Amino acid sequence: MEPVGPQVLPATRADLPELAAVAASTFPLACPTSVTAENIAAFVAENLSEHRFADYLTDPDRVLLVARDGARLVGYAMLIRGVPDDDDVQQAVTLRPAIEVSKMYVVPESHGAGASSALMAEALTVARDTGYRCAWLGVNQENRRAQSFYSKHGFAVTGTKTFRLGAAVENDFVMVCPLADP
């Protein structure tokens, strides 16, 4: 019997082509309307290609999860261990050790079908089970839908940071979710 709803699993090399395609199609959806197509394309080429995802899979500081609805990949999440040497993030993320929910995207036709919640639940479980005291993320200040979703999963705004997107600098909220001890 096939599982009901989305299934979240660790990503594998076999997922790479589909993962890069989903990433390229979903990243623009989270960008403010002021972001140029050129800046989006540059970010996708530099950070969301099949080659980059292959690098991410072998990086010991990253965890890459995929959500599947049957055989189809419908979303993904990437966790990065630690906090960068960014003064704004350092001030906003005070619980340590911390892990970043760096990327989390689901194809639009799967919005509301449980894939996002399943990905976030698994990401927070991985974080908690591997000894992190909090998960944190950056979200564009204009992306109210994502902010609402993250709030429902225990994240709260603790600060701000900037995010370079091609030639532009975007303003993000830093949101933190404290995790119970394992």
Image: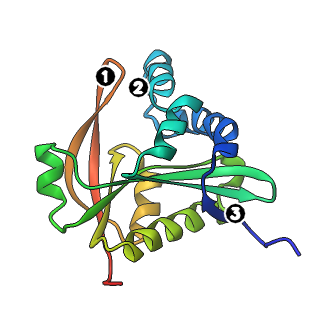
> How much space separates mark 1 and mark 3, taking CA atoms?
33 Å
Element type where label 1 sits in the image: strand
- Side (left or right) of 181 relative to 35: left
Question: Foreground: 15 or 172?
Answer: 15
Question: Above or below — where is 127 with respect to 73?
Answer: below
For residue 113, what is the image quadrant? bottom right
Residue linked to disc 1: 168
The image's mark for residue 34 is 2
For the residues marked 2 and 3, what is the alpha-carbon distance in whole angstroms?
Answer: 29 Å
| Residue 60 rendering spot, x and y as whole percentages | 40, 51
Residue 77 appears left or right of 128: right
Residue 49 in view, yes or no: no
Residue at image coords 48%, 40%: 30
Mark 3 is on which residue type? Ala
Q: Position of residue 32 (x, y in %)?
A: 43, 34
Q: Are marks 1 and 3 in contact (CB under 8 Å)?
A: no
Crowd rating for badge 2 (residues with CA inside 10 Å; few <14, some 14–19, many 20+): few
The residue labelled by disc 3 is 113
Image side of residue 139 versus residue 43, left or right? left
Name the residue rendered at 41%, 76% in the picture.
Answer: 129
Q: Is residue 174 above or below residue 141?
A: below
User: Which of marks 3 and 1 precedes in the sequence?
Assistant: 3
Q: In the image, which is nearer the foreground, mark 2 or mark 1?
A: 1
- Of callouts 2 and 1, the N-terminal one: 2
Q: Are marks 2 and 1 in contact (CB under 8 Å)?
A: yes
